[in-house]
Amino acid sequence: MNTSLVIKLLVIAAVVGLALLSTRGVYLHRMLRRTVAVHLKSGTSMRGVLQGVYVDSIVLVHASAAPSGAKEFTPVDGAQVIPKANVDWMQDLNTVAAGEVS
């Protein structure tokens, strides 16, 4: 195989790889400083302002929690650091459903 062809293919692969890596977590970063609900795999739900998004965790401030099966949210003190591995799914609570008046 031609050496220049191999180099061109490696450059293309590197560019594509960087493009894919740069888009990871973009949506979560768009939710920064917004009120979110975080539903954990344990069944607990948390609500708060998304302050940080990191490789392995997210940070909520002004948060409240509702253990599995609870109807009411209880305020929790301080910043809540939640490992991403524990997150089942998240909601952006600032979005308005179609047809609703904001």
Image (tube, grey):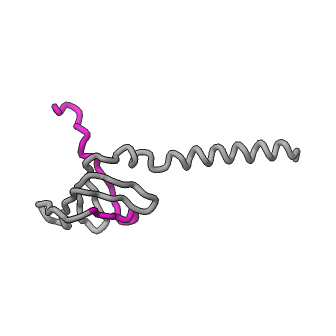
Residue for point 45% across, 50% down = 25
Q: Position of residue 11 (x, y in %)?
A: 72, 44
Give, as a single range, the part of the protein colored magenta. 79-102
Tell whether position 68 is magenta: no
Side of 64 where 3 appears, left or right: right
Residue for point 28% across, 49% down = 91
Q: Residue furthest left?
A: 72
Q: Position of residue 83 (x, y in %)?
A: 37, 65
Q: Relative to 102, say whether 63 is above or below.
A: below
Q: Relative to 71, say whether 50 is above or below.
A: above
Residue for point 16% across, 31% down = 101
Front residue of 99 and 72: 72
Which quadrant of the figure contains the C terminus? top left
The image quadrant that residue 45 belongs to is bottom left
Side of 12 where 99 appears, left or right: left
Q: Relative to 58, say whether 28 is above or below.
A: above
Side of 5 where 74 appears, left or right: left
Q: Residue furthest front?
A: 78
Tell whether position 82 is magenta: yes
The image quadrant that residue 40 belongs to is bottom left
Residue for point 22% across, 58% down = 63
